[in-house]
Image (cartoon, rainbow, N blue to C red):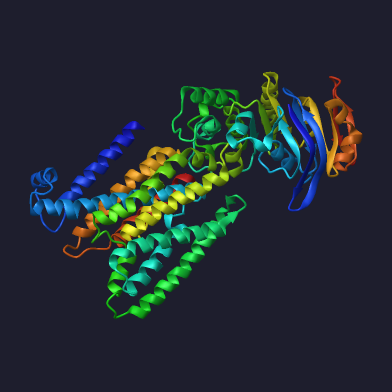
Amino acid sequence: MTLRFAALVAMLFAVAAGALLVGGTTLSPSAIGAALLHPHSGEIATIVWQLRLPRIAIGALVGAALAIAGALLQGLLRNPLVDPYLTGVSAGAAVAIVLSISAGVAAAAVPALGFAAGLATAIAVAALARRGASLDATRLILAGVSLSSLFAAIIALVLTRVQGGGSAPAIVSWLAGTLSGRGWNDLAFAAPYAALGALLAFLSAPALNALRLGDVRAAAVGVDVGRAQWTILASSSLLAASAVTLSGTIGFVGLIVPHVARRMVGSDARYVLAASALLGAALTIVADALSRTLLAPAEIPIGVLLAFIGVPTFLYLYLRDRRTAAA
Amino acid sequence: MIAVRDLDLSVAGQTLLANMSFDIRNGEFVGMLGRNGVGKTTLLRTLAGLRPIESGSVALDSRNIAALSPADRSREIAFVTSDDVFADRLTVREVVAAGRYPHHRWWQWSEEPHDAEAIARALTVVELQQFADREFTTLSSGERQRVWIALALAQEAPVLFLDEPTSHLDLRVAQQILKLLRDQVESGKTVVCVLHDPNEAAAYADRVLLLAGGGILAFEERERALSAELLERAYEVPMEAVTTASGATRIFPRHPA
């Protein structure tokens, strides 16, 4: 197990180093190395420190946050098809962001508004799913899906109204998911919430292991089921809202990475959460690097690219499962 | 000792069982019998502290069970249900390891040597040590039942509650499970077990709790509780008693000849 995690960490660093080399300006590894050591040494240092590094760091945070949130919710709801946006976080954030972009709200305020709206939606969904002190999985899914479709309708309405106006491209790029134009400031805003979410996630891992055996068994081994469910929901909402604020709606990381992680490290939630974080970060950094280079100088939205990678991977994993089950 | 006083149980506003007062002694095997829907599972969950108590009290060694924290309670009482589960790719050992939860601090992430010993012991008792790394979903229903019991044993709680651990199992596996529960009692544990077959209770339990008509019909030594007359009242079918070659009494529904 230690070896597998060492390999995952090494892969993450290799991927991050590779992503540093990729971009509009071709830079040699030695030039990048020198720039890393001397942050104020000129133009190359500016490219490395102000453009590439923050983007890699944001990619890592977004990918790790989405993957942890997905692993948490899949475990909590005992449903492998759940993704971190199930609780309405992304739809709520999207509505707020779309409305504020189209209303011309200052760009600096948009992420905070999206973050707040995403969390508010998650709280509303949780309130609808409450049953006594605990959560009802079916009601949570129903509430999340129905609020999300309501918000999607509002977004569609706004988009038809702003067509031809100046804000449509900004809205579409946000909806498709992108890491471009983000910097250290955005990271500094989202990182504390993501860190809190991750801390809660890792503290919940033992309870999550017990909850997967059913609520009655979890209660029988001493899990405070209500408290554990709320903690896990709060954690996944914080993580998803931080990610959405930074990158827009990037799909598939939160759905697929936990599956890949389980294949690598088994089913124990402690390992699944840690492996999901590392894999999610690496996948998002790779996808972002590809999105910048495949059609350079144009950028493919990272959300679109991940869907192209993600859907076939997911289908492959599941179809292969069915074949082995039949064998 | 578990002391139950004036306990009323209701489900969805309807009183199910009323006015129950009884004691369960340390180190005895209590078999709980009664018709479907009479409230066996509800009573068992309430005794195990898994259901809120509306009226009356349940005390474990003179501590009110409702006042115990979940972890404190789970170090004293283990509860086995056969409810099915989406176990994903959990291995047998990972399932059983969940029994160590109440022994860990809230921030504790890793197993200690004592945890590994308790898990290994529990798997040995149910004779599944060679299955530790198997995926739970690949097991038969009898093996799964033994895993659920191992999960409870890993808790190292002195009191063990089981809800129909022998349902859906063939005779041999059912016997194997009842025998291992009996062994737990011999080694000092208290076992309270919902059973669906009076003869299982006759063979393995010390005392039998018969539920019927919204309350306790009888809570007696097994020979007295398992009379044809009491069981007729409990199950509302004609019963007959048969004496086996070894002299033991067994009770069966009287089938048309």
Nearer-the-camera pick, B181 or B22: B22
Residue A317 drawn at (x, y percent)? 40, 50
Residue A33 drawn at (x, y percent)? 12, 43
Viewer can see residue A74:
no
Residue A160 drawn at (x, y percent)? 37, 79
At horizontal 56% and vertical 60% (from top left) the residue drawn is A128
Which quadrant of the figure has residue B236? top right
Nearer-the-camera pick, B160 or B54: B54
| B57 shown above or below A239 | above
| A219 shown above or below A87 | above
Nearer-the-camera pick, B240 or A184: A184
Classify residue A144 as left or right of residue B73.
Answer: left
Viewer can see residue A299:
yes
Classify residue B73 as left or right of residue A115.
Answer: right
At horizontal 52% and vertical 56% (from top left) the residue drawn is A126
Nearer-the-camera pick, A207 or A193: A193
Which quadrant of the figure has residue B123? top right
Classify residue A31 as left or right of residue B124.
Answer: left
Image quadrant in which the N terminus of chain A is located = top left
The count of marks equals 0
| B94 shown above or below A60 | above
Residue A169 drawn at (x, y percent)? 28, 72
